[in-house]
Amino acid sequence: MMKKHSTSRTIVSLIGIDYQILTRSGGDNMDKFFLCGLTVICIAIISFLSVFYAFDLMFHKWYAEVLLSGFFSLTFLTIYLLLIQTFSKERLPRGYKSSPLTTSNVTRTCFVIMISFLMAQPVRIYFLENRLDQDIERYRIGLFKQFVTRNKQLYQADLQRLKRRAIELSTLADDGAAVSLKAKNDAEITAILATISTDNEKALLKINNSDFFLQRIKAAGRYPVSWLICLLVMIFFGIPVVLILSISGEGRYYLLKKQADHELIESAYLGFKERYSAIFLGRYGKQVAFYEVHTDAPYNWNRIPEPGYGTHEDFQKEQGW
């Protein structure tokens, strides 16, 4: 029994739920909080594997992949948890428009969508790996042909100049000086051809050793099933958001949590005012209270109304004129 409570406490704590308050509320919406926590654990696993696969395509060094995957997945998960833990359940005072579609909640939802979209990219290219391998192989061939053409064009002018010079030298008599010039000219042509060949070999090696991660993402966009996979991942990332927003802010847990939060805020505010007065009394010997311009400080929703302005006749009556 204790183990079950410990497991439940750990899981719901992942989404920022105060387990003591949840227990005092009689386990209000415990099933939703527990499901939300389990989903977050699955999201953490998906995030790590997704980032690991992405770095595996880029680095091919397991220690770098593990370290970077752990760092980036934890970073994304921390941001994600911060977003879902801070969805507002606070009801605004009467007179203020209250809606779950606040700027704060909408902004957080947009960030969750962005994170889920980024995490979905390695997932969708993983499931289309075989198809994308064929696309990337065609891309490699085309890229190498393009490089060979441009590399040849880069030296084309020099080769043409040396070939024209070779024709001119061929008309000279075969004396010592002409033979030397011909040999030098042929050596320059051979050097350029060797450079072109070396550059082509290096380019081919780099192209064959690259997995073209970004090109895979671009190529995956041509397959409708890849967008379905992306959508499913984004929906899965959105489950905790939907679960949290579906829980009423008037439930026992959120009412108790609101009460505890307000007690903490008001206690800290009262301590601040006492400290404020003590500083003036200790340093200057004056009794000074912190001036408040709101009737509900420190929440500051309702401002103290300014005194009204009377007429000239009111002033005369007040003065007895």
Image (cartoon, rainbow, N blue to C red):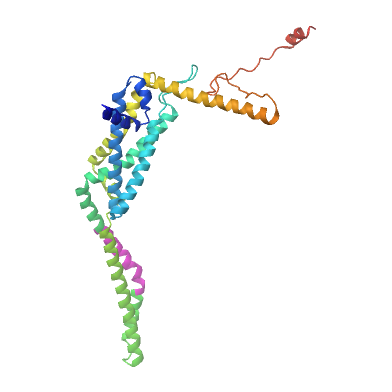
* Residue 105, quarter of picture: top left
- Left or right? Give the position of 317 relative to 121: right
At 25% across and 41% down in the image, what residue appears? 226
Q: Give the answer, above or below, for where 128 lies relative to 231.
A: below
Q: Give the answer, above or below, for where 218 lies relative to 239.
A: below
**Predominant SS of the magenta segment:** helix
Residue that sits furthest to the bottom in the current view: 175
At 24% across and 46% down in the image, what residue appears? 126
Magenta stretch: residue 144 in it? yes
Near-viewer residue (179 or 202): 202
Residue that sits furthest to the right in the current view: 321
Q: Give the answer, above or below, for where 283 lies relative to 90.
A: below
Question: What is the span of residues highlighted in magenta in the rendered image?
Answer: 141-158
Q: Quadrant of the N terminus?
A: top left
Q: Give the answer, above or below, for where 275 lies relative to 306.
A: below
Expressed as whole percent of the image width and height from the top left, the position of residue 156 reads: 34, 70
- Left or right? Give the position of 297 relative to 19: right
Q: Is residue 98 visible?
A: no
Expressed as whole percent of the image width and height from the top left, the position of residue 161 reads: 36, 76
Near-viewer residue (270 or 73): 270
At 30% across and 49% down in the image, what residue appears? 66
Q: Can residue 19 be seen in this view?
A: yes
Magenta stretch: residue 161 in it? no
